[in-house]
Image: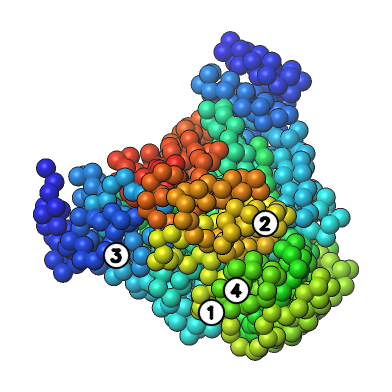
Amino acid sequence: MVTQASVLQQLAAIAGPEHAGPPQAEEYAVDGLPPSAVVRPGSYEQAAEVLRYANSERLAVIPRGAGTLMALGNVPRAYDIALCLSRLDEIVEHEPADLTVTCQAGISLGRLREHLAAAGQMAPLDPTLPAQATAGGVLAANAYGPYRLAYGTARDFTIGMRVATADGRITRAGGRVVKNVAGYDLCKLYIGSLGTLGVILEATFKVRPRPREEGELAFALPGAADACGVAAEAERRGLSVAAAQVLNPAAAQALGLSAGAAIVLVLNLAGTPAAVARSAREIAALAAERGGRAATSPPQAGAQHPPEADPPPAGAGAPTGDSRAVVGWLSVLPSRVPEAMAAIEASAADARTSAYPTAGVLRVRCTTGDGGETLRRLREAAREAGGRLVIESCAPALKRDLDVFGDPPAAFELMRRVKQQFDPNGILSPGRYVGRL
Amino acid sequence: MARRNLIRELQSACGKKWVLHAPEDLLVYEYDGTIERGMPEAVVLPDSAEQVAAAVRIARRHGVAVTARGAGTGLSGGAIPCDGGVVIATPRLNRILELDPENRRAVVEPGVVNLDISVAAAAYGLYYAPDPSSQKACTIGGNVAENAGGPHCLRYGATTNHILGLEIVTADGEIVQAGGETGEAPGYDLTGVLVGSEGTLAIITKAVVRLLPRPESIITLLAIFDEVNQASRAVSAIIAAGIVPAALEMMDKYTMQAVEAAVHAGYPPDAGAVLLIEVEGLAEETAEESRAVQEVCRDLGARELRIGLSPEDRERLWAGRKGALGALGRLAPSYYILDGVVPRTRLPAVLDGVYAACERYGFRVANVFHAGDGNLHPNVLFDERVPGATERVLDLGGEIMRLCVDAGGSITGEHGVGYEKRNYMSWIFSEDDMEVMARLKAAFGAEERLNPGKVFPTSKGCGEVSSRMRAAIARAGPDAYI
Ligand SMILES: Cc1cc2nc3c(=O)[nH]c(=O)nc-3n(C[C@H](O)[C@H](O)[C@H](O)COP(=O)(O)OP(=O)(O)OC[C@H]3O[C@@H](n4cnc5c(N)ncnc54)[C@H](O)[C@@H]3O)c2cc1C
């Protein structure tokens, strides 16, 4: 019989008594469910040992970084151990001239940013709460923001990882060089797997030089199609747009970009000063052609929203304390973004929607006072626009009755077999993933 | 008898005409661009995913392996049927099914030739970015399987960054959709692991690819250096200066001499190396970046800089680079193309090591490669008719891979592990690392049924070693380059 006392004793033996104990605060609860124990390993080996122990005793482990993205996922089937990676927070290697950085999973993006900025570089990770979020957590949740337009998502710039397997082995995927096709690209599998296949201990990223000039433009436009049209044309011309967001009136208002009943297009520019200046001019002309007017002051020199510096302006995805709030995203073909925006508004009157137009991703925040009714309507709206609504956060009570990821995808059977192979005892974040894997 | 039944069943699934089994018909399916070869029992040329699935099920019932094959330009022995069995070749699956300029994507069958996508998309000002030097011949299926790169992957990324979804046939003969309906889908990124899986997890029957708008401005620069070391230091310096060109390629002295003799690119006979640098983007950006690149090159001792602005001038600057492989063919009866990666800062040291190793073995080597991402391609010149030469070249290849690994790099940047490098895998991955990969293979139910003997270490050998590289290289077309 495994008792809480024996778990605590074992974890204390692994990580030291000051780094293992019962949960002190609410914050370790996942969807209201508290763990029996919290452990903060101080080395990869300790993390692996925790897993070996948990695997042999069939204890459910949920890894966590800073906890900023813990709302994502289905209600866990079981939760014994919170495996906190916050002590694994070092830069392992950074050779600026190679444009690569290797860091431990528990490092905050704030610290990573500072470190890279000193060398005039950046890693384009762009989650909602960038300062606190940890590298490992952002990878596990595959969190991204509007800067994916220019820099892609984690799968595009993560080149290597160290991962502890469910049975407590420390393994490597990828490497530290920017081009590498040796073996299966398991990094892709771990990104977005929400701690259900392994525990990310370390990651290597391609980094970039920071842009020399940045700026932000915002326009009020008559409709979403106009806003998407401006963004698409700017991208077609290769203008220096790093991020684009199309905000519905409610989202615009929430950001203080009050523009009456209009749609607002926010564009972040990055590049050389001459290219940014020209881009700003051409975009203003494009917007004017479609009946747009500036919704804020014209671009200023100097950094505004480099991806990891500030919360992205839309804020539609930020977790929230309001128990009636729902945050979700859906992905549709870019050409169907305006249609999807309209369908969302029709199903949730107070929805704040921000779309990344050329990626076809929409993020939604609304409130539900009606049980799951609004959610159901939103899901239907997403389906009609050819997408699938993923709920990033909502009240645990609502979650119990649904799969936050929506209907299982076409390849679900393969995914189930992957999970079965990687975690045969089902100890890693059980029940939290797609189809409750 | 068993073989006759196998063939008969394949014929009834795919049509008699599309199943090859006579020895003389099988001959061309024995090898790819590498040194090894292996003879299949039969080759099927299916016309649909359903036929692929049927062929896989038939092979499965007969307990024989299946190896997918695109154009056979692979340089790691990936398409060689090591265990015999059935080869599924994709020349008939060559349709561009959908071209959607508004959403900048295309849905293509696996046998579509890489360049044909860009040709079809050109009408909309779009193109498919990954550009392996064999792009006039190699197929998207082969590119996806190898996660193929190319000169412009420095800026735009390799195949993996441009595949939005796949349709696959599993080892059980089932057709499965892995992503691709929209840009982002919940669930494990199966598309991501299928890219680069070298035909060992599933057979690709459709790919959704991303298309990019053509850049407004392109400037090509050629920088000539006295010493190879200056050139490789310039590569690091350009990257360190925060410039990421679209392409940054290097050719060393031996390559240049060969090129000069063949295509008269105008390289000075005593030069040590050239860099070919391409910057792309808005006119404002390319002007500035090209100035900055020139400055770095001059600082590092470039003795001459040539600039190409018009398409014709740019093409002229590329001519030597593109003609290199053909030119090398004049220098020796055979050459062995290697593929390794090192951190960019280690390029100068590793290149020195490559020259030293080749000298020790007594082989001439010509380096022509994707320097910007530290992706080396030493081409070792040799004569396969000299007894023992092939074996010694392979040993030398191993030593060069060792140099890359010791520098913190990898045993392959774009050509894949295939058959050729499977026993080097343990130099960069532990038993545990590979065991996890084996689990993925098990999840796909692929085990030894799809492309056996590839990627992972085994002592088992393919049929025999011969030197057929030239045939495969000829297949890549007269103007393929490396
Ligand atoms: C002159 C020359 C230059 C080259 N330059 C480059 C370069 O710049 N960059 C680069 O990356 N490579 C280069 N290559 C290597 C080669 O062209 C690439 O690896 C290419 O992707 C192979 O495509 P293919 O259609 O010829 O595939 P094949 O050689 O036929 O097969 C390669 C692998 O793909 C698998 N495969 C093929 N089709 C499928 C399918 N439908 N489903 C699943 N698996 C499949 C095969 O089983 C095999 O493992 C070059 C080769 C030559 C000869």
Amino acid type of the residue tagged 3 in the rendering: Glu
Q: Is residue B450 visible?
A: yes
For the point 41% across and 43% down, the residue is: A401
Image mark 4: chain? A
Q: Identify the element where label 4 is drawn.
A: helix
In the picture, the disc for residue A342 is 2
- Quadrant in the picture for residue A348: bottom right
Q: Chain of mark 3?
A: A
Give the residue at mark 3.
A27
| Marks 1 and 3, the one that precedes in the sequence | 3
Pointer 4 residue: A253
Q: Amino acid at mark 2?
A: Ala
Q: Quadrant of the N terminus of chain A?
A: top left
Quick one: label 4 or label 1, which is nearer the N terminus? 1
Identity of the amino acid at label 4? Gln
Q: Which residue is mark 1?
A: A121
The residue type indicated by label 1 comes to Gln
Front-most of residues B118 and B147? B118
Q: CA distance from mark 4 to mark 1?
A: 33 Å
Residues flagged by tags 4 and 1 on a common chain: yes
Q: Nearer the viewer, mark 1 or mark 2?
A: 2
Choose the circle earlier in sequence order: 4 or 3.
Answer: 3
